[in-house]
Amino acid sequence: MTKKVLILGAAGEISRMLIARLLKESDVELVLYGRNVSRWLASLVGPRVELVDGTFSESEKLVAALSGVDLVYLNSMSRAADTKSVIAALEATGVSRLIGATIAGIEGEVPSGLATWTQANLPSSYIEGEVASANLVKDSSLDYTLLRLTWLFNDESNREYELVPSGAEFADAEVSRQGVVAAILAIMETEDTKYYRQSLGVGKPNTHYDKPSFY
């Protein structure tokens, strides 16, 4: 059972929502890591929360932050060098369980209309970084779960999501951040190895559009 979680990129929107639910709905201890988290997340300091200011490239800080950790959530995978550093720290410390958030389309699994729209609305360097990062994780020894997130919106009343396995077409154009958090929590709570070394699309069912409805 997971007792201590390291959240990398803890000041991000999804991370903050995940932290709030973990603190409210579980008794896990949290290590919150990222740039200036001691400023952005100061209100969260308490018996179950440790804050660590650092970047993903700071190997020694990452290794120290992993002490006693059972599971790591990585909120950003847009820079392959940073992802490589995270993987190295995990492998060096023997922490094998990683849940990483990446983007839909990195496996060529998105229908052409949505793929074209996405490519037109994201920098090519960003997409290339996500692809390279995902490949690094897949080539590692880690018990990873990669979450390929489609386009995101906020709606506290909408936590609907589905998980689409690697190799299947992933046509969902959108999903709420709250739905993504619900998916992460469900995966965290799964006791067996069902989601180990898996790449899963996370989207809202029946949103098979050529672009998100909110654009």
Image (spheres, rainbow, N blue to C red):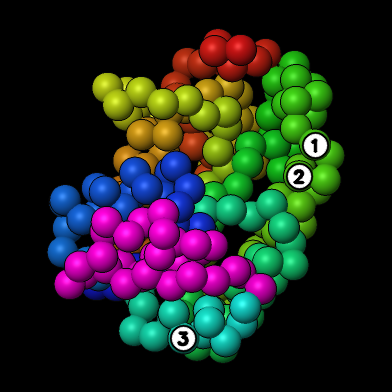
Residue 90 lies, in percent from the top left, at 53, 79
Magenta-colored span: 30-57
SS category of the residue bearing label 1 = loop
Q: Are marks 1 and 2 in contact (CB under 8 Å)?
A: yes
Indicate the quadrant containing the C terminus: top left, top right, bottom left or bottom right.
top right
Mark 1 or 3, nearer chain start: 3
Q: Residue at x 61, y 82 (%)?
A: 59
Residue 123 got which mark?
1
- Residue located beneath label 2 in the image: 126
Question: Distance between the Cα atoms at labels 1 and 2?
Answer: 5 Å
Magenta run includes residue 197? no
Indicate the quadrant containing the N terminus: top left, top right, bottom left or bottom right.
bottom left
SS category of the residue bearing label 2 = helix
Within 10 Å of the Cα at label 1, are there few (<14), some (14-19), or many (20+) other Cα atoms? few
Q: Residue at x 41, y 39 (%)?
A: 180
Mark 3 or 2, nearer chain start: 3
Q: Give the residue type at disc 3.
A: Ala
Name the foreground residue: 136 vs 57: 57
Magenta run includes residue 36? yes
Question: Distance between the Cα atoms at labels 3 and 2?
Answer: 29 Å
Q: Is residue 198 above or below residue 89?
A: above
Q: Give the residue type at disc 1.
A: Pro
Q: Residue at x 55, y 11 (%)?
A: 213
Whether residue 100 appears in this view of the structure is yes
Within 10 Å of the Cα at label 2, are there few (<14), some (14-19), or many (20+) other Cα atoms? some
Residue 64 got which mark?
3
Q: Left or right of 41: which side holds 212?
A: right
